Amino acid sequence: MLKLPSRFLSLLAFLHDAIVIIAAWLMAFALRFNFHIPEQFIGYIWESLPIIFIFHSVAFYSFGLYKGVWRFASLPDLKRIMRAVSFAALLSATFALLVHPSIVIPRSVLIMNPMLLLLTMGGSRFIYRAWKERRLFNSIALQGKPVIVIGVEDTSFNLIKELSKNPEWRVVAMIDPSNKLIGREIMHTKVEGGLEDMAQIAARHDCQHCMIAMPGSRHEKRRLAVEAARKVEGMEVLTLPAMSDLISGRVSLSQIRKIDVEDLLGRDVVQLDTHGLSSMLANKVVLVSGAAGSIGSELCRQILSFHPAQLICLDISEYALYTLQQEFSQWVTDTELVYLVADVKNQTRIQRILQSHQPDVVLHAGAYKHVPMMEHFNVVEALQNNAHGTYQVAAACQAAGVPTFVLVSTDKAVNPTNVMGASKRLAELICQGLQHADNSNTRFITVRFGNVLGSSGSVIPKFREQIAHGGPITITHPEITRYFMSIPEAAQLVLQAATMGNGGEVFVLDMGTPVRIIDLARDMIKLSGLQEQDIRIEFTGLRPGEKLYEELLADDENTLPTSHEKLRIAQARSADARWLANLLEWLSNIPHLQETQIKQDLQRWVEEYQPDTRPAPDVSLRGGALSLDTLPSPSQQIH
């Protein structure tokens, strides 16, 4: 097919509009006089036409009417035409009424002319687009694999439009989960039924593919759509990213992917107080500890979107920090990025960093977090890093006058049965103790949440690996449950809590409904195209320090609502300055204590701590006790 150069196409568009300008001016007079124009007005028409033509031509060019492509004409093009026609009409009226009153132009002509121009110019562009799309649609109508689109949102319209141009796919029907538009047509595609009609519609069209285009719907509705599609034998379920992942409204076929377990565990889009976040972060200096970990790196990404003056990324792992630096080197940002290798336990180093950079906000996400690894042989390191390291950073912030300090905590700090959870509970109490110190100008805020999808040590990547190797999938207990949240959502809510706290609060995130790990494993098996009988599931027993279920509140805690539906404030036990001084003295002595003595002492500092007395696992290369988790590298031990 011959492709004409863009300049030639722009010239054709201009010639079209030139003819329309003349025709609309003549038609406006003809309509005004019921197609019997008086002799004297014919002279006025030809006298005024050159000026009118110049006004409109200049306006059309100035408003960029010849930069677009007619085949892709859309609402923004129509708005551009309206602005150009309105401006030209204003110039024409000024000329007719003020500049050259000797040329008599009826006022009705000045009104009808822009209306005719808008109708003709806009109509011709959209007629051309419809003609091209109909030709394209008809040319591939019998090609490609048949596919059903589930959802009737704006995204569905864009998806069908893209699929109609691609010979690989052929949209044969749509499904409306709400049953409100059944029988209607969108882009020549009929809405044939609801989710309950999925099997019949698929059989009618001999279709084995469906695409879920519901990024704006709540997670519960998306999950129902997935479950309805999975009930159809042989149906392959594809989806679009969630709304939080879609950068623009335009759908790209490259965004279509197979349904994954994260889609079943996914959650609704978080509504953020962007004004409050902008006030806290824009043009400010922000420091994130543990910046190269799963939570810390996402915090950095979210913070960059609010354009701080400087973002300090601090982490103990040189390699992980280098990886983060390489990622951000591809970003276009006006924020100064500083990468610092530092240990949060190094008091002198932390103090110098804070005094040198004077951050406005510090988010402390650096911590050892793997329960089994910290439970035995690494108890001292867990307490020194998670508890004493938190104190060093928080106290240095207080001394440097940092306005806001945010501690990223965990649900494992609630009624802890392991050292990792107890160390994080100590970190919470340390922040509350510092908050109660005299003359403290720092707001100490704690945010507590559960497991995040895709974090280091997450069970999902491990299950994928086990399925890829043909099984078995190893689970500690058939009734074990966990909360799940996406990393972006967790980071967003941590930042949101930072804008809301006055100091001393422990914010608890709405983690949704807990998920049974065995149900998660079964979902992953099915999504892999296998049946439960194809992959064996083995139960290995709870590991030391591991709970059957996680809690977000201790036995003696209640919560208070906040202005955000996904954030609540725990009425947690607090600590004072005297308690904090005694704790610090004990923490300084723990390197000289035995592990059993440390765990006994922990019960005095964390009253709700109930240590697990089971023996340490066999960590030899032959041992099978660590089969559930990938042993994390040093860089993975930082949030």
Image: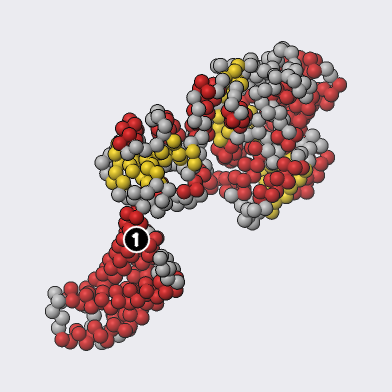
Residue 110 picture quarter: bottom left
Of residue 255 and residue 59, the one placed in the foreground of this image is 255
Query: Residue 22's spot in the image, x, y percent?
Result: 28, 78
Of residue 604 and residue 255, the one placed in the foreground of this image is 255
Residue at horizontal 44%, vertical 74%?
7
Instruction: Examine the rendered structure and indicate whether residue 535 appears above or below residue 489.
Output: above
Q: For this view, does 267 lie left or right of residue 576?
A: left
Q: Residues within 10 Å of mark 1 (few under 14, many from 20)?
A: some
Q: Can residue 416 be seen in this view?
A: yes
Residue at horizontal 42%, vertical 71%?
4
Residue 394 picture quarter: top right
Instruction: Examine the rendered structure and indicate whether residue 163 appears above or below residue 409.
Output: below
Query: Residue 150's spot in the image, x, y percent?
Result: 38, 39
Q: For this view, does 50 lie left or right of residue 33?
A: right
Q: In which quarter of the image is the C terminus?
A: top right
Of residue 562 and residue 392, the one placed in the foreground of this image is 392
Query: Residue 521's spot in the image, x, y percent?
Result: 54, 25
Instruction: Examine the rendered structure and indicate whether residue 329 appears above or below residue 56.
Output: above
Task: Kindly give the residue lying farthest to the right in the view shown.
Answer: 592
Q: For this view, does 469 lie left or right of residue 196?
A: right
Find disc 1 in the rendering and name its residue. 132
Residue at horizontal 37%, vertical 59%?
74
Query: Which color scheme does this rendered protein use?
Result: secondary structure
Query: Residue 288's spot in the image, x, y percent?
Result: 69, 42
Give the residue type at disc 1: Lys
Residue at horizontal 33%, vertical 73%?
17
Tally the marks: 1
Q: Can residue 379 be seen in this view?
A: no
